Image: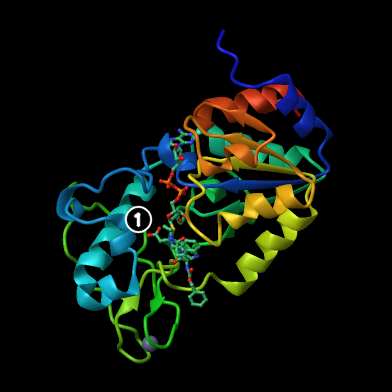
Amino acid sequence: MEQLVSGEAAKLLGQARRVVIFTGAGMSAESGVPTFRDALTGLWQQFDAQALATPEAFRDDPALVWGWYEWRRSAVGQARPNPGHLAVAAIEARVPSCVLVTQNVDDLHERAGSVAPVHLHGSLFAPRCSACAQPAEVPAGVTEEPAGGRRITPPRCTRCSAPVRPGVVWFGEALPEAALSAAVEAAATCDLLLTVGTSGLVYPAAEIPQVAARLGAAVIQVNPEETPLDHVAEVNLRGPAARVLPALVEAVWGGANRG
Ligand code: BV8
Ligand code: ZN
C-alpha cells in the first residue's frame, strides 16, 4: 500500500492549534478544472493564461476575455468538489482554529462545505462594472459553453453602461486589501500551514507559506511535483490532493465521516 502520508505529517496536524490551509489550482485539478500550467484549449490555445488574465487583454479584446471567463465559469459549474475539497472542510471542522486561503477563483471549496475561504485572487461569481465597480448579475444556473469556447460581448453596467468585467484579480492588479491582510495575519500567527496544489510562483500569494515558516510555523506541502516551496516545507507529501488529504484526515482522526 503506497505511503501517501507520513507519521510526521499526521503528528504535526494532530497537535496543531492554529492552522492555515493554502490552496492553488492543483486542488481543483481532480475535479476536471484545468490548472494554470495546463495549456489553454480551443479559441484560447494560441494564448498564455497569464497574458489573457490582464486588464490590457480585456481592453484590447473584451469579447475574447469575457468568453474565456464564461467558459471557465461553465466548466466549474459542471465540476464537483473532489475528496480533497471535502477533506479540507473536515480539517476545518476538527482543528481548534483554521483559516482557508485560496488562489482559486472557483467555488468548489464553498460547495464542499468550507465556510469562509479567503479568495486572494477573486471569484468567477462576482462580476462587476469595469468603470464604477458596481456589482453585476451572475447569469443564473450552470451555463453550457461550446467545448472550444466562443467570443461573448460582456454585458453593460446598469449604472454607467461600461463593460462588466470578471471579479478576479488580473496580473498587474492589486489583491483585495482585506483578503491579503487576513491571509498574512493568519500565516503570521499559525502553528501549521498546509499548502496544497500550488506552484508557488505567483506573488504576493506565494509569500504566504514563507511568512508562516519565517515565523516558526511548520509547513506541510501536498504536490505531486517539486516546487520552490519544497525548501520552505518541513514535510513534502508527493501525491494528488484528492488522495493525500483524505489519507491525512484518516491518519489523524480515523476517517473524515466519523463524528
Ligand atoms: C501585482 C486570477 C502589483 C485570474 C490570478 C514578485 C516577483 C515576480 C513577479 C511578481 C512579483 N510581484 C508581483 C509580480 C507580478 C505577478 C506575478 O506574480 N507574476 C509571476 C507569474 C511571475 N503578480 C501580479 O501581477 C499580482 N499583482 O503584483 O500587482 C500591484 C500592487 C499594488 C498596486 C497595483 C499593482 C496579481 C497576481 C494574481 C493574478 N491572478 N488568478 C484568473 O484566474 O484568471 S493568478 C492565477 O495563477 C491563480 O489564481 C494562481 O495564483 C496562479 C496559478 O498558480 P497555482 O494556483 O499555483 O497553479 P499552477 O497551475 O501554477 O500550478 C498547479 C500546481 O498544482 C503545480 O505545482 C502542480 O504540480 C500541482 N498539481 C497538479 N495536479 C495536482 C497538483 N497538486 C495536488 N494535487 C493534484 N491533483
Ligand atoms: Zn458602471
Q: Quadrant location of residue 54?
A: bottom left
User: In the image, is 148 to the left or to the right of 214?
Assistant: left
Q: Residue 168 in the image: state x and y as whole percent.
A: 43, 66
Indicate the position of residue 236 as horizontal and vertical percent values.
61, 30
Residue found 20% across the figure and 73% down from its top: 61
Residue at image coords 40%, 67%: 171
Q: What's the colour scheme?
A: rainbow
Question: In which quadrant will I find the C terminus?
Answer: top right
SS under mark 1:
helix
Identify the residue position indicated by label 1 in the image: 73
Q: Residue at x 61, y 73 (%)?
A: 177
Residue at the far top in the pictured view:
1
Residue 190 position in % (x across, y down):
78, 50
Quadrant that contains the N terminus: top right
Task: Tell me: 73 left or right of 125.
Answer: left
Answer with left or right where residue 133 lies relative to residue 17: left
Compare residues 154 and 243 and report the one nearer the observer. 243
**Quick check: 242 above or below 140?**
above
* Residue 5 in view, yes or no: yes
Residue type at mark 1: give it: Arg
Residue at position x 56%, y 50% in the image: 110
In the orientation shown, which residue stands out farthest toward the front? 231
Residue 115 appears in the picture as rendered: no
Residue 172: percent from left, percent from top: 42, 71
Q: Quadrant of ligand 2?
A: bottom left
Q: Report crowding for label 1: few under 14, some 14 to 19, many 20 or more residues within 10 A (C-alpha).
A: many
Where residue 80 sits, quadrant-wise, is top left
